[in-house]
Amino acid sequence: MGGKLTIRRLSTPGEMLEVERLQTIIWPGSEVDIVPSHLMLTVAHNGGVAIGACDGDQMVGFVFGFLGTDSASPNRPAMARLKHCSHMLGVDPRYRDAGVGFALKCAQREAVIEQGIRLVTWTYDPLESRNAYLNVRRLGAVCRTYLREAYGPMRDALNQGLPSDRFQVDWWVTSPRVRSRIDGTRPPLDLANFLDAGVSIVNAAELREDGLPRPSPALQPLTGNMLLVEIPPVFSDLRRKDLPLAGEWRVHTRHIFESAFAQGYLVTDFVHLKGERAPRSFYLLSQGEAQLG
């Protein structure tokens, strides 16, 4: 990390080859899953958006997506349901937690607003705290859709061995909610704020002797206007150390999120605490569609 970080739209064969290279670094172990440069080039030239982040002359991150239609109202004409489907966001591991992903998503937002699009959707693993913090807390996306085995068995090193369950988030890019999150004008709340307001933790985790969190066997009822759902603070580390425990967390949270979404809750915030003994991470679930704006 030496040069000044620059963000730019990608449109040339050479740039897309750089994105190919980055994919092999970010998601190693399965080159057959790499999105090829010719496909990304075609998409970028036909309504899609490809944006790169460069440190000097080296590309260190990218975001890539294409036009799609929202499935919420399938009987409406496609023009009325137009959205941007954000397919991939990737950052070189050496540049993680340096604001690269946030900068790329902000540039993507500007690009789709110029196209007249209000909604961007994408998927991510709901147990990954780093992604939850960016997508929900920093960007202001919300979620009401849980996808079981969204991609079937995955072969890359980051995902192999677990069901590919995903959140599909909705990012209403012109909403006051999103503007306030991106501008930093909405003060963030921490766990104490929610607990003081009487919000209950549905599944308070327990620490094993080895320090790894395990799912709570006793769940609190899904009642009230807001709920907190705990997830592992660093799921990638837990998965590497104890894959069966990671599988338990997958099934445990799958049940909670599917039940909560069926009852009208949606994910509206995310809290990560460093903690004195161990870090903790929580989603905030809220009732009502008014939380979208």
Image (spheres, grey):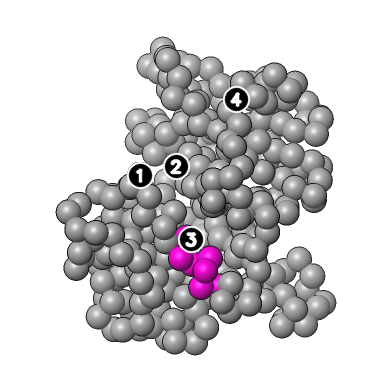
C-alpha gap between disc 4 and disc 3? 27 Å
User: Which quadrant holds residue 69?
Assistant: bottom right
Residue holding disc 1: 97
Q: Which sits in the foreground, 245 or 85?
A: 85
Which of the marked residues, 1 or 2, is nearer the chain's N terminus? Answer: 1
Q: Is residue 57 above or below residue 167?
A: below
Which quadrant would the C terminus be assigned to in this image? bottom right
User: Which residue does the image show at 70% across and 50% down from the upper left?
Assistant: 144
User: Which quadrant holds residue 84?
Assistant: bottom right
- Structural crowding at the residue carrying mark 2, measured as other residues with C-alpha within 10 Å and reported as few (<14), some (14–19) or many (≥20): some
Observer-side mark, 3 or 1, equals 3
Q: Is residue 138 above or below residue 57?
A: above
C-alpha gap between disc 1 and disc 2? 8 Å
Disc 3 residue type (three-letter): Cys
Q: Say which mark, if any, is on residue 130.
A: 2
Disc 4 residue type (three-letter): Leu
Is the Cβ of the residue at disc 1 closer than 8 Å to that at disc 2?
yes
C-alpha gap between disc 4 and disc 2? 17 Å
Is residue 292 shown left or right of residue 93?
right
Residue 282: image location, x then y, percent: 58, 32
Q: Is residue 138 magenta?
A: no
Which of the marked residues, 4 or 1, is nearer the chain's N terminus? Answer: 1
Disc 1 residue type (three-letter): Asp
Residue holding disc 3: 106
Which of the marked residues, 4 or 2, is nearer the chain's N terminus? Answer: 2
Which residues, given as a range, are shown in magenta?
Answer: 105-112
Residue farthest to the front, as pictured: 185
C-alpha gap between disc 4 and disc 1? 22 Å
- Structural crowding at the residue carrying mark 4, measured as other residues with C-alpha within 10 Å and reported as few (<14), some (14–19) or many (≥20): some
Q: Say which mark, if any, is on residue 191.
A: 4
User: Which residue does the image show at 44% across and 36% down from the upper left?
Assistant: 235
